[in-house]
Image (cartoon, rainbow, N blue to C red):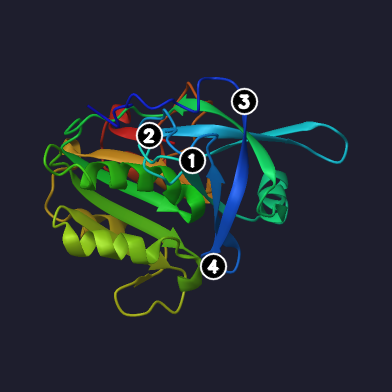
């Protein structure tokens, strides 16, 4: 079973619920982890992997602003959830969240189920992400690698960023890779890559290096990131219910559209 919901009360039941910010941890120059407390210490999210939630607040014109975010907390965590949020110059919701102080409240609604994972559903997965597009991919990584007694899925993560300082959850990803021989991660940055990191973008050479001698037809690909990454790798989805046509680099490998899931 994936992320089984225990007898604890699920927080997310389809309606908006106010949660209180209890702490903020800076992880880079423009990204922080925001911890929000559930109403009760024993509450669990009620989410499954992979799923998202909505946040809502009113702007200066009393207009509701609603945006989706993906928690990085294990769905079974009791008492709180963590959001990894990068602030964007034009991002209304991200700027609002970064303005919050401990004790402030934010409205949440869920679950928004993206890709219901079950152990060994896809024996070999390739995760391709950029920036904060890491968050749903990290959900999958955590779910699979924390359930190795049952789930033997092999994972390859290709994660691109502008600079080394932009790499999110770097220590967490390296720690998982050091302990789990079925998880491999490749970091790319646009310039000045240190040892162990690739200079450039996620391109044909990087993908083929990461995949090695695996048969492309045997792989499941998950993609999440900014528009430029979608355009280059897979093409964009049309809507939450329409994955759109497969284009870009992945199409050039002759794989089927059904082998690719776009978050």
Q: Nearer the viewer, residue 163 or 243?
A: 163
The residue identified by callout 4 is: 28
Q: Earlier in the sequence, mark 2 or mark 3?
A: 3
The residue identified by callout 3 is: 16
The residue identified by callout 1 is: 70
Dot 4 alpha-carbon crowd within 10 angstroms: few under 14, some 14 to 19, many 20 or more: some
Q: Nearer the viewer, residue 237 or 16?
A: 16
Q: Is residue 199 above or below residue 21?
A: below
Q: Earlier in the sequence, mark 1 or mark 3?
A: 3
Tell me where residue 198 appears, x and y as whole percent: 34, 70
The image quadrant of residue 5 is top left
Q: Mark 2 touching mark 1, by CB under 8 A?
A: yes
Tell me where residue 244 appears, x and y as whole percent: 46, 27
Q: Residue 37 got which mark?
A: none
- For the residues labelled 2 and 1, the Cα–Cα distance comes to 9 Å
Inspect this view and state whether residue 26 appears. Answer: yes
- For the residues labelled 1 and 3, the Cα–Cα distance comes to 16 Å
The mark closer to the camera, 1 or 3, is 3
Q: Earlier in the sequence, mark 1 or mark 4?
A: 4
């Amino acid at each position: 079973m994936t992320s089984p919901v225990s007898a604890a009360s699920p927080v997310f039941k389809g309606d908006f619920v106010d949660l209180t910010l209890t702490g903020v941890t800076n992880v880079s120059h423009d990204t922080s982890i925001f911890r929000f407390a559930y109403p009760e210490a024993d509450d669990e999210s009620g989410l499954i992997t992979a799923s998202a939630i909505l946040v809502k607040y009113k702007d200066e014109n009393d207009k509701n602003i609603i945006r989706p975010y993906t928690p990085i907390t294990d769905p079974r965590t009791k008492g709180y959830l963590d959001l990894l949020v990068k602030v964007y110059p034009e991002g209304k919701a991200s700027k609002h969240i970064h303005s919050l102080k401990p004790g402030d409240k934010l409205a949440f609604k869920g679950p928004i189920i993206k890709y219901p994972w079950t152990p060994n559903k896809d024996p070999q997965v390739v995760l391709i992400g950029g920036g904060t597009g890491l968050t749903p991919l990290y959900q999958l990584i955590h779910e699979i690698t924390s359930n190795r007694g049952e789930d033997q899925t092999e994972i390859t993560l290709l994660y691109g960023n502008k600079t080394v300082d932009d790499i999110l959850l770097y220590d967490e990803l390296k720690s998982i890779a050091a302990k789990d021989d079925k998880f491999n991660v490749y970091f790319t940055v646009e310039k000045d890559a240190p040892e162990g990191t690739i200079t450039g973008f996620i391109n044909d050479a990087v993908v083929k290096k990461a995949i090695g001698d695996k048969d492309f037809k045997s792989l499941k690909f998950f993609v999440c990131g900014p528009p430029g990454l979608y355009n280059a790798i897979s093409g964009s989805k049309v809507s939450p219910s329409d994955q759109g046509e497969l284009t870009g680099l992945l199409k050039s490998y002759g794989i089927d559209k059904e082998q690719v899931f776009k978050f």
